């Protein structure tokens, strides 16, 4: 059992928790994730490691309530326990000193973007962070990003905070104005990652994307998380979640993510009505 020791609401339906998981902490690296199961009847869901602490063996997770399991997790309070946490899983993000690294994160991709930004900064890169949110209410982790970025560019879809536009607009503008980028890392909605990859391909900038397909075991045993990269089938949980963004079939990923829409809606309806 894994005890939740702290909890905060960061934005509507976006929650932060700190959980005791000493074995996960021991080997955790930026870009990796855990798979959790809340209780005996729960499903397994993947969440990325936002931060981890050797001193007290805790991990921090940031998640958006989008369906039954994440809503249920959102109802847990400090003192409550999660039945299973497996991790760290996935390959860590490849970190080196590229020179100038640009990290583009959208929405709830921000926690992953943050962990990678911090690692790139520690490796000696000049780091430019571009973070985008739907509107002012959903802006999260601004102070965290500020601490690990040399430049921080924030944007909101509706212009209610800092500037109006998508992260793609900000990256385009940055590059058009002669901004340097030796490496780009992107994480967020699939459509955003697809468009970021299109821009950086034109400029010939090496780009990695952190993919988020549906996962079950998270250890390479089932292929639920398969994606096509450079014409080859890869399992995101063991071969990724990071892949060369210029080689990823984003349209296929988008299609596969919607495969269980009906079942997901039914499970959430039952949960809201108290029928589990
Ligand atoms: C490696 C990895 C790391 C992730 N890290 C985080 C994180 O740090 N924070 C966070 O909030 N979410 C993260 N996700 C997404 C998270 O796993 C899903 O939101 C969660 O599984 C939804 O479960 P649910 O039962 O609440 O919703 P469901 O009822 O299963 O789904 C509700 C909606 O969410 C979409 N969805 C379902 N599974 C995923 C998925 N794997 N990725 C994206 N959308 C999905 C569905 O298409 C549907 O529209 C990550 C996913 C992966 C693969
Ligand atoms: S989730 Fe089963 S192989 Fe990746």
Image (tube, helix red, strand yellow):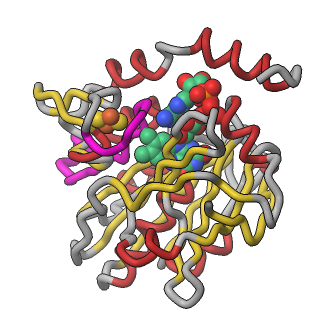
Q: Is residue 121 above or below residue 34?
A: below
207 in the magenta segment: yes
Question: Where ligand 2 lies, by image quadrant?
Answer: top left
Which quadrant is home to the C terminus? Answer: top right
Q: Can residue 169 be seen in the rendering of this structure?
A: no
- Left or right, residue 217 beside residue 67: left
Where is residue 175 drawn, in percent x and y? 36, 54
* Outermost residue, bottom side: 55
Q: Quadrant of residue 104?
A: bottom left
176 in the magenta segment: no
Please give the name of the residue rendered at 25% of the width and 40% of the height, measured from the top-left corner.
Answer: 220
The stretch of residues the image draws in magenta is 200-220
Where is residue 117 drawn, in percent x and y? 43, 69
- Left or right, residue 157 beside residue 180: right
Q: Quadrant of residue 9?
A: bottom right
* Outermost residue, front side: 40
Please give the name of the residue rendered at 50% of the width and 62% of the height, measured from the top-left corner.
Answer: 49
Where is residue 67 drawn, in percent x and y? 68, 30
Please give the name of the residue rendered at 69% of the width and 19% of the height, measured from the top-left corner.
Answer: 267
Most foreground residue, 102 or 88: 88
Q: Is residue 137 above or below residue 234?
A: below
Where is residue 90 drawn, in percent x and y? 31, 53
Q: Is residue 193 above or below residue 55?
A: above
- Left or right, residue 270 beside residue 154: right
Q: Can residue 55 be seen in the rendering of this structure?
A: yes
- Left or right, residue 21 beside residue 27: right
Please give the name of the residue rendered at 75% of the width and 40% of the height, measured from the top-left corner.
Answer: 72
């Amino acid at each position: 059992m894994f005890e939740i020791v702290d909890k905060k609401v960061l934005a509507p339906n976006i929650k932060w928790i700190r959980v005791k998981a000493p074995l996960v902490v021991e080997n955790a690296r930026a870009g990796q994730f855990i798979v959790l199961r809340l209780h005996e009847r729960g499903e397994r869901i993947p969440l990325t490691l936002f931060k981890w602490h050797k001193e007290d063996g805790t991990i921090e997770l940031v998640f958006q309530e989008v369906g039954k399991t994440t809503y249920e997790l959102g109802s847990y309070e400090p003192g409550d326990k999660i039945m299973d946490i497996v991790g760290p899983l996935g390959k860590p993000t490849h970190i080196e000193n590229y020179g100038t690294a640009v990290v583009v994160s959208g929405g709830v991709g921000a926690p992953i973007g943050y962990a990678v930004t911090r690692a790139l900064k520690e490796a000696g890169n000049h780091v430019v962070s571009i973070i985008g949110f739907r509107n002012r209410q959903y802006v999260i982790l601004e102070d965290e990003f500020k601490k690990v970025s040399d430049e921080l560019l924030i944007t909101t879809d509706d212009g209610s905070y800092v500037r109006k536009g998508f992260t793609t607009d900000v990256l385009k503008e940055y590059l058009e104005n002669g901004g340097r980028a030796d490496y780009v890392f992107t994480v967020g909605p699939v459509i955003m990652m697809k468009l970021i990859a299109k821009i950086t391909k034109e400029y010939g900038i090496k780009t990695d994307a952190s993919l988020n397909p549906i996962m079950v075991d998270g250890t390479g045993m089932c292929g639920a998380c398969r994606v096509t990269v450079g014409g080859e089938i890869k399992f995101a949980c063991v071969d990724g979640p990071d892949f060369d963004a210029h080689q990823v079939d984003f349209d296929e990923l988008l299609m596969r993510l919607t495969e269980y829409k009906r079942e997901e809606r039914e499970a959430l309806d039952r949960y809201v009505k108290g029928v589990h």
